Each structure stands twice: as structure tokens, then as C-alpha cells.
Image (cartoon, grey):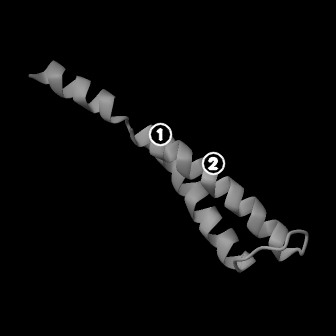
Amino acid sequence: MIKLLAFIMLIGGAISLVLGILGIFGSVALMLHPWALAIIGFIFFIAGISMLKYRRDTDEVAADNNRRQ
């Protein structure tokens, strides 16, 4: 479940980062402020990558707890 959330954050962050950067340089007209979209996209992209790298999935944690008992 955690890896699924991280993957969604990664994809959503990448999309909003690209749209924000294109909005900053004037290639795309957006309804939102392009700087805000780029900053939020960057935060979600970095958070998604770090969650995929360092978090163990809930299934793995449950399996480890069952083995210990």
C-alpha cells in the first residue's frame, strides 16, 4: 500500500513539475500559478522517490512480524 501511494505521488509530482516548468516559460497556459505548480510538483516528486527507496511495504512488515512471533 505504501509503495502504491509512493508511485502515485511520483507520477503526479512529475506531471505537475513538467506542467509547472512549461507554464513558467510560457509554453502552456494554466489555470493555476505555474510557480506553485512547479514547487508542489517538485515536493511530491522527491517525496515519492524517497518513499520508494527507503520505505518497506506494509506486506513486508506484516510478514516480518508473523515470523518473529
What is the spatial separation of the Cα atoms under label 1 and label 2, in whole angstroms?
11 Å
Residue 32 placement: quadrant:
bottom right
Q: Work out which quarter of the rendered image holds the C terminus and state it.
A: top left
Binning the other alpha carbons within 10 Å of mark 1 as few (below 14), some (14 to 19) or many (20 upward) gives: few
Tell me where residue 45 appears, x and y as whole percent. 60, 55
Q: Are marks 1 and 2 in contact (CB under 8 Å)?
A: no
Tell me where residue 54 appears, x and y as whole percent. 44, 42
Q: Amino acid at mark 1?
A: Leu
Tell me where residue 27 appears, x and y as whole percent. 91, 69
Q: Residue 68: which disc?
A: none
Tell me where residue 30 appears, x and y as whole percent. 77, 73
Q: Which residue is located at x 45 percent, y 39 percent?
A: 3
Q: How many marks?
A: 2
Q: Which residue is located at x 40 percent, y 42 percent?
A: 2
Residue extending farthest top: 67
- Give the mark nearer the N terminus: 1 vs 2: 1
Q: Which residue is located at x 32 percent, y 28 percent?
A: 60
Residue extending farthest right: 27
Residue extending farthest front: 31
Q: Which of 30/13 is in front?
A: 30
In the rendered image, the vertical position of residue 22 relative to residue 53, given as above or below: below
Q: Which of 30/67 is in front?
A: 30
In the picture provided, is 52 more to the left or to the right than 37? Answer: left
In the picture provided, is 42 more to the left or to the right than 48? Answer: right
Q: Which residue is located at x 39 percent, y 38 percent?
A: 1
Residue extending farthest left: 69
Q: Amino acid at mark 2?
A: Ile
Binning the other alpha carbons within 10 Å of mark 2 as few (below 14), some (14 to 19) or many (20 upward) gives: some
Q: Residue 11: which disc?
A: 2
SS class, disc 1: helix
Q: Residue 4: which disc?
A: 1
Residue 37 placement: quadrant:
bottom right
